[in-house]
Every structure is written in C-alpha cells, then in structure tokens.
Amino acid sequence: MKKTKSTKNVKIEAVAKPKHHLIIFAHPNSNSFTKAMVDQIILASEKAGAETVVRNLYTMNFNPILSQEEIQGAYQGILAEEIRYEQQLIHKADLITLVYPLWWMGFPAILKGYLDRVLTAGFAYQTDANGSVGLIHGKKMQQFVNLGSNVAEYETKGFAQALDVCLINGLFNFCGITDIDYELFGSLYGISDQERQAILTKVAEKTTKNITAL
Ligand SMILES: Cc1cc2nc3c(=O)[nH]c(=O)nc-3n(C[C@H](O)[C@H](O)[C@H](O)COP(=O)(O)O)c2cc1C
C-alpha cells in the first residue's frame, strides 16, 4: 500500500481578511472642499489596503424620496433592488465613513433620504412591545462634517452637542453602531489654504488609524 506523505510539518499561514471600507458622501459640487476631503480619504483607505467603495449620492442621482408604498413594503421585507444593494454594502463594511456639509443643522436632503430609505425596519433596527433594538453590529464609523459656522460658537450655543445627540451618535447608536469617531470642521469660508491642507491631512490620518485598528 502506498504511504501518504506526512503533513505534520506543513505550516498553514493565516490569510488576513480584507477590510471593507464604505464611504458615503453628499455634495453637489465636484470641486468642493468636501469632495477634496473624500479624495484624501479614498487615497488613505486604499494605501491602508482596505477594499474601498464610494457612494457619491449626487453622481448616483440617488432618489431620496421615501414613499408610503416603500415604508409598507419594508415592513413585509419587500425592498427595491437599489436599496437591497446599499444594505449589502453596509452589511459588508467594517468601517463606514460619512462626509457631508451641514445644511440647515442637518444632513443634505439627499443623504437624509438615503438614510430614510436604506435604514429600514428589519435591517437597521427592530421594534416590538419592549422597544427598539439596533441590528447593525460590529462596525466602526467615521463622520466628517463641514460647517460654514465656527465650531467653538456651536459648542457655546449647545448646537454641537445637539448634532452629536441627534445626527451623529444618536441616530447611529439607535441602529447598533456605537463606535463612532467624528469631527466637525468649521469656519470653512474663512480659513486659509494652509488650514484647509491641515484638515485634509487630518482626515487622511484618521482614516489610516481607523482602518489599521479594525
Ligand atoms: C443649504 C445650505 C444650508 C447650510 N446650513 C448650514 C448650517 O446650518 N450651519 C453651518 O454652519 N453651515 C451651513 N451651511 C454652510 C455649509 O456647511 C458650507 O457651505 C460647507 O460646509 C462648505 O463646504 P464646501 O466648501 O465643501 O461646500 C449651509 C450651506 C447651504 C448651501
């Protein structure tokens, strides 16, 4: 009988799982500072070896209108193909980055509509008689928010805390995402090129750090 070779000394090397990074951003101007930030984030992400997917909501021409029919459908698990696709991207992501300008104290409408339509019941949260629980687990998030106003002034007036409680940690904690690194970048109409460059460097460095820590 033929003897098979012993595999005792064969080394099995662990193959590192690729890290998935989903970047969602909303700005209608492809020459905006917000877009320049996204470009730096993409470069840092790819350099860190993450599989990087970018959802530019304006170039996608994303329809932000959540209809009554769609709300009812979602409760029965009936979803449009485009929504199912976005949910798969979120499901796959280890790091989710949101980049947007603050518009009237909130998300630009296209991003708000994206969240309205994509974070459906049964995917992002579940509600029963005992209350609601988030369903999106095991992910890190970064949010970079651009403001025309001064951040120190927003802190003094309590607006920065309100944004944290509502848009940033509040909304995403509800969906189960609790590990959120965010920063508001303010006075964007008044800062120098050097200060803008420092912001670009900062978002790139944060991206590298957050991917490395995954
Ligand atoms: C419709 C609209 C609403 C805005 N609302 C706010 C606001 O509530 N607070 C604020 O600080 N800046 C506000 N801004 C200023 C933007 O945040 C600012 O233009 C943007 O962050 C600059 O980034 P960009 O150079 O990438 O456009 C608003 C701008 C627009 C166009």
Image: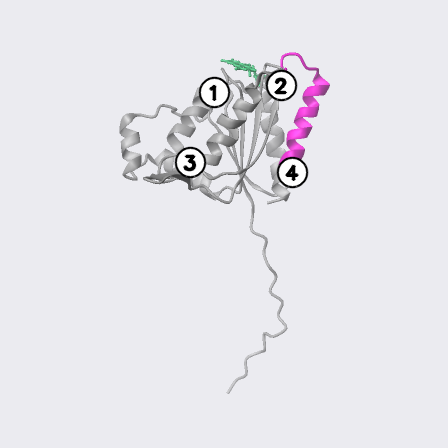
Residue topped by disc 2? 151
Amino acid at pointer 3: Glu
Q: Secondary structure at mark 3?
A: helix
- The outermost residue toward the right is 194
Residue topped by disc 3? 86
- The outermost residue toward the bottom is 1
| Residue 177 seen in the current view | yes
137 sits to left or right of 78? right
Camera-near label (2 vs 1) is 2
Q: Using the numbered discs, state the Cα–Cα distance from disc 2 to disc 1 in whole angstroms.
A: 19 Å
Few, some or many residues within 10 Å of mark 3 (<14, 14–19, 20+): some
Q: Is residue 67 above or below residue 124?
A: above
Percent x, y of residue 13: 61, 61
Residue topped by disc 4? 208
Q: Using the numbered discs, state the Cα–Cα distance from disc 2 to disc 4 in whole angstroms.
A: 24 Å
Q: Using the numbered discs, state the Cα–Cα distance from disc 4 to disc 3 in whole angstroms.
A: 24 Å
Which residue is at the front of the view, 29 or 166? Answer: 166
Residue topped by disc 1? 108
Q: Is residue 31 above or below residue 21?
A: above
In contact (CB < 8 Å): disc 2 and disc 4: no
Which residue is at the front of the view, 69 or 25? Answer: 69
Please give the name of the residue rendered at 59% of the width and 45% of the height, measured from the top-left corner.
Answer: 214
Magenta region, residue range: 186-207
Q: Using the numbered discs, state the Cα–Cα distance from disc 1 to disc 3 in whole angstroms.
A: 18 Å
Q: Using the numbered discs, state the Cα–Cα distance from disc 3 to disc 2 in whole angstroms.
A: 32 Å
Sequence-earlier tag: 2 or 4: 2
In contact (CB < 8 Å): disc 2 and disc 1: no
Q: Secondary structure at mark 4?
A: helix
Few, some or many residues within 10 Å of mark 4 (<14, 14–19, 20+): many
Q: Main secondary structure of the magenta part?
A: helix
